Amino acid sequence: MKRLIDALADDTDFFVEQVQITAVVFDNTDDVTLWATTIFDGELYFFHLGLQFSALDLLLRLAGERAESLQEDVADALATVTEWPCLLEYATEEEPPVPLPGVALKLACTYPATEEGEEAEEEPMPHNIFYLEGVFLRIEP
C-alpha cells in the first residue's frame, strides 16, 4: 500500500474523505495516533493521524453503526490496560477497518524534529504522520 505523503504535490493543509480507521494507538496522555487508509486520486493510501483524545471521541461517534462498540473498546482498554501504548487493531476479518461515512478530515503535514539551534542539512521531508486540523461532515439534501 502506498504512503499518502508520497501522493501530495506540496505540504499545504488538505482534505481527505473515504477514511477508514485500521488501528487506534494511545497511552496515558492526551495524545492518540490513528492508523488509517483513504482513497486519493483513485488509489488506496495509508497514513498515521495524530490527534487529541477529545477528537478521537468525536471521530468514534461518527463511525456509524460501529460507534458504540468502538467507544466500548476504548473504554475497556482504558480500564484494563497496564502496559502502554495500547493498540486496538481493526484490520482483520473479525475486526474490519472502520469507515467514517460522510466525513472529511482536514490534515496538516508534520516534519522531523530538530534539536534547538540545530539546522537541517537539507530541506526536511515531511513524515507520513499528519495532524488533525478539523472534522467536516458532508450534508446530503
Image: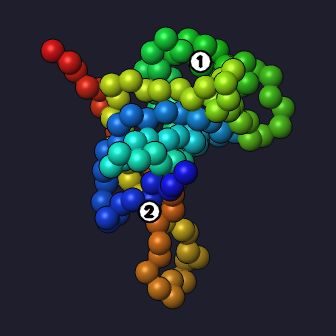
Residue at left 54%, top 68%? 112
Image location (x, y in percent) of residue 30: 59, 38
Q: Which of 80 and 43 is in front in this view?
A: 43
Image location (x, y in percent) of residue 15: 31, 45
Q: Residue furthest front?
A: 42
Image location (x, y in percent) of residue 77: 73, 24
Residue at left 33%, top 49%? 41
Q: Quadrant of the C terminus?
A: top left
- Whether residue 30 appears in this view of the structure is no
Image location (x, y in percent) of residue 138: 26, 26
Q: Does residue 84 appear left or right of residue 30 in this picture?
A: right
Q: Nearer the viewer, residue 133 or 21?
A: 21
Residue at left 41%, top 47%? 43
- Mark sitting on residue 71: 1
Q: Which residue lies furthest to the bottom in this view?
A: 121
- Mark sitting on residue 104: none
* Res 32 quadrant in image: top right
Q: Residue furthest left?
A: 141
Helix, strand or loop at disc 2? helix
Instruction: Name the amino acid, label 2.
Output: Asp
Q: Does residue 77 appear left or right of residue 68 in this picture?
A: right
Instruction: Name the amino acid, label 1.
Output: Gln
